[in-house]
Amino acid sequence: MTQNLQDMTNAELKHYISEHRNDREEFRQALQVLLDRRDADTASQPYPFDLADPESEVTAILKDKIERSATQPVRVAYYNLYLRIDREDTLTGGKIRIDTYTFDPQLIEGDTVRIEDWKVGVTGERELENRVFSFEATVTEVHKTVVRHQHLSVDIILESPDRETIGQLREAVASINSQVFGENNRREYPTFLDKTYA
């Protein structure tokens, strides 16, 4: 060892550890100095080199952490409402996000909703203007994904039989130039989404 590890700052030790990651003995000594500087009250796991069977014991520790995190309740849920704007003949164009909610809109496959006054900012002859669209759409898919930190993302995919309006909406979205105009000026209160029953 060419340097006195005890005289190094934490930043220097971390750099030294990184530089000597392939030298087991140097790595271990520098890491031990860094670990010895921790606050005694800090929660910690056993140092792998001190374990009798590091691979299986570390694996057990990680599995325990994963299982404990899986049992924790979801903290935040985001419900993303997407509208398919594919062309019927080519199925291209993807989908656009209509809105995101932090409450469950209670939509399942087959439900029909009415979207009222959804606005798309488009470039007019002289300035930015809004095109307003209203249409009915049916829930065709619901995808739930748990993401890190106990967040739940639910993507609700809608498709509208009103191909003429959706075609106009698709053209309006395509006409937006590269300038960023911010969020769509859409309603933010619950009546924006009206569930209808057949």
Image (spheres, rainbow, N blue to C red):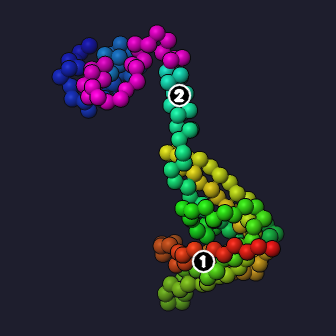
Label 2–label 1 contact, CB within 8 A = no
Q: Compute the Cα span from label 2 to label 1.
A: 45 Å
Residue 106 appears in the rendering: yes
Residue that sits furthest to the left in the current view: 7
Closest to the observer, 66 or 174: 66
Three-letter code for the amino acid on which mark 1 is drawn:
Thr
Q: Is residue 54 magenta?
A: yes
Name the residue carrying label 1: 191
Query: Left or right: where does residue 165 sit relative to residue 25?
Result: right
User: Which residue corresponds to the image point at 20% horizontal and 20% vertical from the top-left?
Assistant: 6
- In the rendered structure, which disc, 2 or 1, sits on the residue that comes first in sequence? 2
Under tag 1, what secondary structure?
helix
User: Which residue corresponds to the image point at 73% horizontal and 65% vertical from the top-left?
Assistant: 139
Considering the image in quadrants, where does the C terminus appear? bottom right
Counting from the top left corner in percent of width and height, residue 184 is at: 53, 75
Q: Is residue 23 above or below residue 90?
A: above
Closest to the observer, 30 or 92: 30
User: Which residue corresponds to the image point at 61% horizontal and 70% vertical from the top-left?
Assistant: 98
Considering the image in quadrants, where does the N terminus appear? top left
Q: Is residue 172 above or below residue 80?
A: below
Counting from the top left corner in percent of width and height, residue 3 is at: 22, 18
Counting from the top left corner in percent of width and height, residue 113 is at: 71, 73
| Disc sitting over residue 161 in the figure | none
Q: Is residue 18 magenta?
A: no
Closest to the observer, 155 or 95: 155
Name the residue carrying label 2: 64
Boundaries of the magenta span:
32-57
